[in-house]
Amino acid sequence: KTSALIQIDHVVALQNAWESGAWKWNRAKRLKFGNDMMNLLAVEGAANQEKGSASAAYWLPSNKTFRCEYVARQIAVKYKYGLTVTREEKQSMESVLHNCSAQKLPK
């Protein structure tokens, strides 16, 4: 059985990764990305469905206190895998991080 209440979310959605450069990866790197614990997060099913494949430009967690950590994880994952960030993503990320002076990127 599966649960609609809790789902595993890719912080950087698979489609967003594909559009940001994953299309040129080999199968092994795509599998590594898809299973990277830094990019996996247990979330409410409704939030995961609402987010879909959206980047930070179009979706952020409704829990504003979690946004700093969420955006930091997106940045860390995109950096780790050499993925691009659109102008709109960057603006959204900068807007969130402006209020997160103590936030560090995960390692």
Image: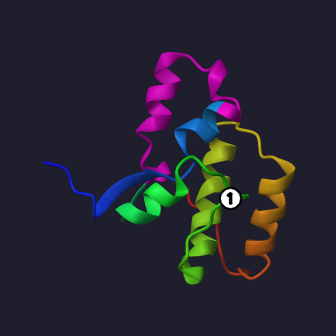
Q: Is residue 95 above or below residue 59?
A: below
**Residue at figure coordinates x 40%, y 39% from the top left:** 35
Q: Is residue 105 visible?
A: no
Classify mark 1: helix, strand or loop.
loop
**Residue at figure coordinates x 68%, y 58% from the top left:** 56
Question: In the rendered picture of this protein, how many numbered marks are placed on residues?
Answer: 1
Q: Is residue 80 visible?
A: yes
Q: Is residue 45 above or below residue 12?
A: below
Residue most toward the top? Answer: 26
Task: Answer few, some or many: residues within 10 Å of disc 1's Cα (few below 14, many 20 plus, some between 14 and 19).
Answer: many
Stretch in magenta? 19-40
Residue 6: say if magenta: no
Q: Is residue 4 left or right of residue 30?
A: left
The residue that mark 1 highlights is 56
**Residue at figure coordinates x 42%, y 49% from the top left:** 37
Q: Is residue 26 above or below residue 76?
A: above
Q: Residue 60, percent across and down?
A: 62, 67
Front one among 103 and 59: 59
Q: Residue 15, percent across and down?
A: 58, 36
Image coloring type? rainbow
Q: Is residue 57 left or right of residue 87?
A: left
| Dominant secondary structure of the residues highlighted in magenta in the image | helix
Q: Residue 99, percent across and down?
A: 75, 82
Q: Is residue 78 left or right of residue 39?
A: right
Front one among 83 and 54: 54
| Three-letter amino acid code at the position of disc 1 | Ala
Residue 20: say if magenta: yes
